[in-house]
Image: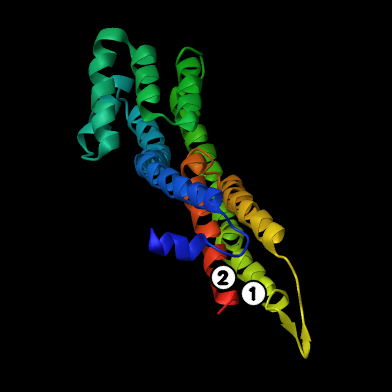
Amino acid sequence: MSILDELVSGDGLSSIHSLIWIGLAVWALIGVLFYIPAKRKQDKITELEMIWPDILADLAEELRAGMGVESALDAIASGRSDRMGLMLQDAVKRMRDEGFGPAMKDFAVKSESPMISRIVSILNVALGSSGSFATTLENISEEFWEIYMLRKERITKTQSTANFILWGGAVICPIMLGLIVAVFGSGKAGDFDLNVDLSLLNQSLFFYMMVLGAGGVWMQSVILQTTQTAIWRMPMYMFIATTTLLLALKISIV
C-alpha cells in the first residue's frame, strides 16, 4: 500500500480516490479478460467477410460450368481447409436434408456476420426467382467486395486520427494538464510566493481523466467501426488516463 499511498496521497486527493483508482484497475483487468475473446470473435467475423466475395464468385463460376448449387458448394468446401471451408461442409450436409434455404440460414447464423446474413437472405430470394442465379451471385460478389474495400480504405485513412484521439485522451492530455498544474501550482512565480489551493482542481481532473479515457475509446471505436468491443476497452484506458495524471502530479511537486 506504500506505493499506492505515495501515488494517490497529497495533491488534494483522498482515500476515496485511492479506492476509485483500485476499482478502475480491477475493472480494467476484467475488461481485458472479456475484450480478448470479443476481439478474437470479431477477427474471425472479419476473416469470413474477407473470404465471402471469393466464395460467391467461385460459386457463380461453378454454376455456369453446369454444376448444381449443392455440388458447387461441396466442391468449393472440399477445396478449403480453413474455417470457411468447414462451415460450408456443414452447410452442404444440412442442405441434403433440409434444402438450400434453411442450411444457408444456419450458415449465416454461425458466421455471426450481419453482412453475410444479408447476402444469404438475398440469395434465398434470388434462388426462387426466374432470373439467372449465377448472374445474381456475380453481381452480389462484386458489390460486396466493393463495400468491403471501401470500408477498409476508410478505416485505413482514419486509423491515425482515431489512434491520436485515443492516446491523446489517455496519455497526452493527462501529461499536459499535469505539467500545467506543475507550473501554476509550484508555489512560486518568480520572486512571488503563491498560495493556491489545487485540491478541488486535482479532484476534478481525476474524474475528468476517467471521462476522457472512456470518451477516447468510444470515439476511436466509432471511427474504426469497432464499437462491439469498446465497452471492454473503456476501463483499461480510464485506468491509464488517471494513472498518467497521478504520475504527472507527482512530477509536479518534485
Q: Secondary structure at mark 2?
A: helix
Evaluate if marks 2 and 1 touch, with contact meaning CB atoms under 8 Å apart.
yes
Question: Alpha-carbon distance for marks 2 and 1?
Answer: 7 Å
Quadrant in the rendering for residue 69: top left
User: Which amino acid type is shown beneath numbered disc 2?
Assistant: Ala
Quadrant, the C terminus: bottom right
The residue drawn where x is 25% and y is 9% is 97
Q: Is residue 100 left or right of residue 148?
A: left
- Label for residue 179? 1
Question: Of 22 and 125, which appears nearest the observer?
Answer: 22
What amino acid type should be assigned to the residue bearing mark 1? Leu
Q: Which residue: 52% across, 34% down? A: 139
Around disc 2, counting alpha carbons within 10 Å, would you say few (fewer than 14), some (14 to 19), or many (20 or more)? many
Q: Give percent across and percent down for residue 78.
A: 20, 33
Q: Is residue 183 above or below residue 154?
A: below
Q: Is residue 25 above or below residue 63?
A: below
Q: Residue at x 64, y 74 (%)?
A: 179
The relative height of residue 45 versus residue 234 in the rendered view (above or below) is above
Pick whichever, 54 or 167, lies toward us.
Answer: 167
Is residue 132 visible in the rendered image? The answer is no
Q: Earlier in the sequence, mark 2 or mark 1?
A: 1
Q: Tell me where residue 126 appears, x and y as whole percent.
A: 49, 18
Q: Which residue is mark 2?
A: 248
Element at badge 1?
A: helix
Q: Nearer the viewer, residue 13 or 125?
A: 13
Q: Which quadrant of the figure has residue 52?
A: top left
